[in-house]
């Protein structure tokens, strides 16, 4: 199996080097998951100029520059990597390699204008490590930490481009117990600060005029403009695990007419009726099943299944960046605990783009060709991405990890490669 994987990696590298710019690619005999919540079908996919030209049961007569026989293997849209700081954090302990959060010593408490997209590095080694495991995009976050408002970000594609952002502006808000202990000593301080910040925004009066409230030292003019724009056009992602915190986030969002998403949600199942009534999506780690803190005493493995039964839109995140590729395991465990399989696939492919305003992520004519051919069940940890296709081009399937493997893989018994090929 290892030899087969290695040969496929080398073949992908040769194909990319010689024909990665080819205009057309035909994938035949794939068990295709289109990215919605429907069962897979045996289909062919024709890709031209980076877009999916056709999807049908038999395209064998179509002309293409490259041909891949999927041989019955699963084919999916490139996966969503969850909420990460990929491209913002290379090595956590090296200060110049971390750009995901505003230093706590920075003056002032409210800086929603802190936009991590300006520090995004598409050449980060984290990105190809994640991409070759079948992931095509992520929600780039201002890291949740010790501030009520962390900053802003958006969806970003793993295509290596310096301007790979898409979708709506996302403002990240912390209302959990940890950050509450850092801001005023209580999670109640979050709501006090948020109310103060939002009271400084412009509001429309009944006569059609706009009223600007007085200045607040808590937030500057740029920050107010950011909040105002996000309230009108963006999305607020509230980090909350405790049921009572989730209810407060729902009430605050309704009061201020915010498009909200809950992230964390370990106790979301407790308030699933309220979540369903509000239409608020929830992003969870389906592996959370133990009370890691007092915010998640009600964590349980069937959280995802219970939320789905309540007709709540569900997404997944692992809470990690350097190991974001393990998110398939998160989704697989949700399925093992009652979530329908096709719902998990949609949550890993098309739904994140739909919720956060990105380009559609499905296998359908006219859409961007971000496609993955898998060795087996994509939600099984024993499976792997055999070939990743981004924007219609074959990925070389190489990363710093594969390069290190080749550099130090012994080729003679008892002798390290460092001595063979220094």
Image (cartoon, helix red, strand yellow):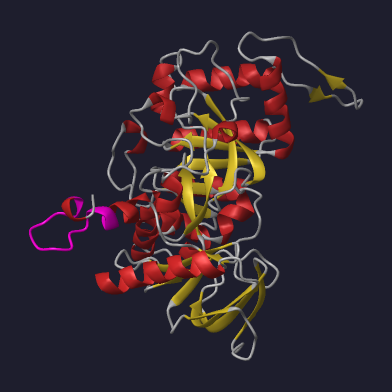
Q: Is residue 295 left or right of residue 21?
A: left
Instruction: Return the residue nearer the eye: 39 or 70.
Output: 70
- In this rendering, the answer to whether 197 lies above or below 82 is above
Q: Say which residue appears at 60% left-offset and 40% top-offset.
A: 260
Is any part of residue 198 visible from this angle?
yes
Instruction: Return the residue nearer the eye: 387 or 43.
Output: 387
- Where is residue 258, by image quadrant? top right
Where does the image place residue 62, in percent across and percent down from the top left? 65, 87
Residue 415 is covered by the magenta coloring: yes
- In this rendering, the answer to whether 58 lies above or below 186 is below
Q: Say which residue appears at 66% left-offset and 21% top-offset.
A: 223
- In this rendering, the answer to whether 310 lies above or below 105 is below
Where does the image place residue 133, in percent across and percent down from the top left? 40, 59
Where does the image place residue 95, in percent across and percent down from the top left? 39, 24
Is any part of residue 303 visible from this angle?
no
| Magenta range | 405-418
Q: Say which residue appears at 58% left-offset and 37% top-offset.
A: 153
Where does the image place residue 382, in percent across and percent down from the top left? 29, 67
């Amino acid at each position: 199996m290892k030899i087969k994987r290695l040969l496929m990696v080398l073949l992908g590298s040769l194909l990319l080097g010689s024909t990665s710019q080819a205009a057309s690619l035909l994938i035949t005999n794939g068990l295709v998951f289109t990215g919605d919540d429907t069962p897979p079908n045996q289909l062919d996919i024709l890709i031209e100029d980076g877009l999916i030209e056709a999807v049908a049961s038999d395209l064998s007569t179509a002309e293409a520059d490259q041909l891949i026989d999927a041989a019955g293997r699963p084919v999916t849209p490139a996966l969503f990597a969850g909420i990460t700081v990929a491209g913002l954090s290379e090595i956590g302990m090296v200060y110049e390699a971390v750009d995901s959060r505003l230093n706590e010593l920075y003056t002032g408490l409210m800086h929603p204008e802190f936009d991590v997209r300006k520090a995004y590095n598409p050449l980060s080694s984290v990105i190809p490590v994640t991409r070759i495991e079948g992931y095509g995009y992520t929600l780039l976050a201002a890291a949740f930490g010790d501030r009520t408002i962390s900053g802003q970000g958006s969806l970003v594609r793993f295509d290596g481009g310096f301007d790979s952002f898409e979708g709506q502006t996302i403002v990240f808000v912390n209302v959990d117990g940890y950050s509450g202990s850092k801001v005023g000593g209580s999670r109640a301080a979050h709501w006090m600060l948020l109310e103060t910040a939002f009271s400084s925004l412009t509001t429309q009066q009944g006569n059609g005029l706009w009223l600007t409230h007085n200045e607040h030292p808590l937030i500057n003019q740029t920050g107010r403009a950011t909040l105002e724009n996000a309230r009108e056009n963006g999305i607020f992602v509230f980090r909350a695990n405790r049921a009572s915190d989730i209810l407060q986030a729902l009430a605050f969002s309704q009061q201020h007419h915010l498009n909200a998403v809950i992230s964390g949600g370990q106790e979301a199942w407790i308030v699933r009726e309220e979540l369903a009534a509000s239409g608020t999506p929830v992003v969870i780690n389906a592996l959370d099943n133990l009370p890691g803190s007092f915010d998640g005493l009600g964590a349980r493995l069937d959280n995802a299944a219970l939320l789905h039964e309540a007709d709540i839109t569900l997404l997944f995140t692992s809470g990690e960046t350097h190991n974001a590729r393990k998110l398939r395991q998160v989704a697989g465990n949700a399925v093992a605990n009652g979530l329908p399989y096709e719902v998990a696939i949609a949550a890993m492919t098309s739904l994140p783009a739909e919720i956060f305003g990105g380009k559609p992520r499905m296998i359908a004519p006219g859409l961007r060709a971000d496609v993955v051919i898998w060795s087996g069940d994509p939600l099984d940890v024993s499976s792997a991405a055999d070939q990743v296709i981004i924007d219609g081009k074959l990925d070389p399937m190489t990363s710093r990890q594969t390069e290190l493997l080749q550099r130090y893989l012994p080729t003679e018994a008892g002798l390290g490669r460092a001595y063979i090929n220094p």
